[in-house]
Image: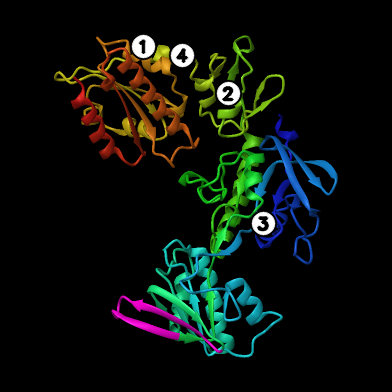
Amino acid sequence: MRAEEYHKTVLVIGSGPTALKMTRSLVQDALPVIVASPGEPGWGEVPPGVEVLSGAHVTDVIGQVGDFAVRLQSGGGRFERHAGAVILALDAKRESGALAAGAAFGERMCSMAQAEDVIFGRQRHGSFRRVIILDRLDGLSTAASHERLLRFALRLQAEFSASIYVLTSQVKVASTGLEILYSRLREGGGLVVKPDAVQVETGKDAVEVRFRDPVLDENVVLDADMVIAAEDETPSSELESLAGILRIERDKQGFLQADNVLRRPCLTNRRGVLSIGSSAAPSTEWDTEQSVAAALSEIHELYRWIEEEEHPETILYNRDFCAFCLTCYRVCPHGAIHFTDRPHFLPLACQSCGLCASACPGEALELVGYEKETFFKALSGLKPLDTDGSKRIVAIACTKSAGRILNAAPADADIRRGLAWVEVSCAGTIRTTSVLRLLARPGMVDGVLVLACHDGNCRSGIGTVVAKKLVESVKALLQSIGADAGRIGYISTAANDGVELARKIAAFRDALS
């Protein structure tokens, strides 16, 4: 794709406040926008120049950053739009957690969403003397849910002068502005208690809450006009299907920001597909604003990168060796392979992790710069130093973590004693044949180490997992033939963890027979 051919249009998927914030920011930066709204957006006036596709559901996304073909369905019709980037901006659902013993929703016991309607909405209640807000007591609430709880409590204080009790296991204020909200609640007379063994009994005129206060070490009984159950943010019902369609990794809760620190606050495993606000994770208002700003900056940087830099092929493909087994398509963590009658490798989507090449059973693929012959030549040229009788070790190191540590270490540092290494773009690119070739040099190599990034700190997401499984399979192979499985080892590290890496390499060296 030539730079002048790429699409600058941004497709925003969502219909709530987060999608509106993102759309307005894009319009202000003169970027064309299409909004695919699963429902009817409740925005009032749509920003000028924006195409809104109401009731539209994404069914497929093909291509790479700058050239996504997005297929959608609305009603009985199917259609296609082209975009340079895709932003997922669906707001989370809100659900109440487990209620305390004896509690049941009713006139005086309700969720926060119900309370907002009863107290501030159409059914506006006359007055309140005392309100108890019952948070989750298992410690699993989030800063986002606590922001909503605090804002709700402050509004009750301001409009009704009600006494507010918040029963919670922990106040979570790990986002900008939340400590201020908490202080305002306390200054207004609100009490926050960490209770044990909460029980609720609803009467005709009031609701009674009993609990044990571990600080006072005594039982407490409170009566209130209403008990309100705080709510958690849970993933939008659209996220699961969108994650499958877009091939986006999710975290354990189902949000689209996988547990990888390198992707905060808006990146996904697919370049040009961004996730913001509570599509990515439970988010406070400040978190959402930061992710909107980060997404806008990322799109401008991606478009600059498309325009100004070269984009050569990253994968060499030999059709004669290809079995058309789809292995490369399945293992690619970045959506960088499109399959028709053969695999097509998208250079703007590829992040050069090499997982496809290492997994290819016919060795039909080569990562440019790490071709078999080039890599084997580099391995054969490695000559670990034999210093004071030290065991000689060859390491295959991820350039983003262990490679940086080894290159920065002084030549006489203990971490480099008896060690030679070759760097790879990702530990997941290592082939079993490369490791076996090193192990087959007993006169030159006493041990082989695979040095990868920590789980959750790998740019490809699964490179560390693949590398660890490779080492385990080689160990099993060595054991099956009666060879010393201790000659190969696996260490995960980070670029700022040189002391611990040195300790682990020394331990591996000392354990070699």
Q: CA distance from mark 2 to mark 4?
A: 24 Å
Task: Report helix, strand or loop for mark 4.
Answer: helix
| CA distance separating discs 4 and 1 | 10 Å
Residue picked out by circle 2:
327
Q: Answer with left or right where residue 58 lies relative to residue 319.
A: right
On residue 14, the disc is none
Q: Tag 1: residue type?
A: Ser
- Report the colour scheme: rainbow
Task: Tell me which label, 1 or 2, sits earlier in the chain.
Answer: 2
Q: Nearer the viewer, mark 2 or mark 4?
A: 2
Label 3 CA crowd tier, 10 Å (few <14, some 14–19, many 20+)? many
Foreground pick, 237 / 199: 199
Looking at the image, can residue 216 be seen?
yes
Residue topped by disc 1: 380
Question: Distance from label 1 to label 2 (Cα)?
Answer: 29 Å
* Position of residue 122 measured from the top left corner of the image (x, y, whole percent): 71, 80
**Relative image position of residue 105 (x, y in whole percent):** 58, 74
Looking at the image, the residue that sits furthest to the left is: 388
Q: Which tag, 2 or 3, sits closer to the chain's start?
A: 3
**In the image, residue 325 above or below residue 59:** above
Looking at the rendering, the stretch of residues picked out in magenta corresponds to 205-222
Q: Residue at x 55, y 70 (%)?
A: 148
User: Disc 1 or disc 2, which is closer to the eye?
Assistant: 2
Task: Give the residue pinned by disc 4.
Answer: 374
Camera-side mark, 2 or 3: 2
Label 2 to label 3: alpha-carbon separation: 36 Å
Image quadrant in which you'd find residue 301 = top right
Q: Which residue is mark 3?
A: 22
Q: Is residue 371 above or below residue 24?
A: above
Query: If you read the primary sequence from the N terminus, does the residue marked by circle 4 or circle 1 appear first?
Result: 4
Spot occupied by residue 156 in the image (x, y as percentages of width and height): 56, 83
Say if mark 3 contacts mark 1, CB within 8 Å: no
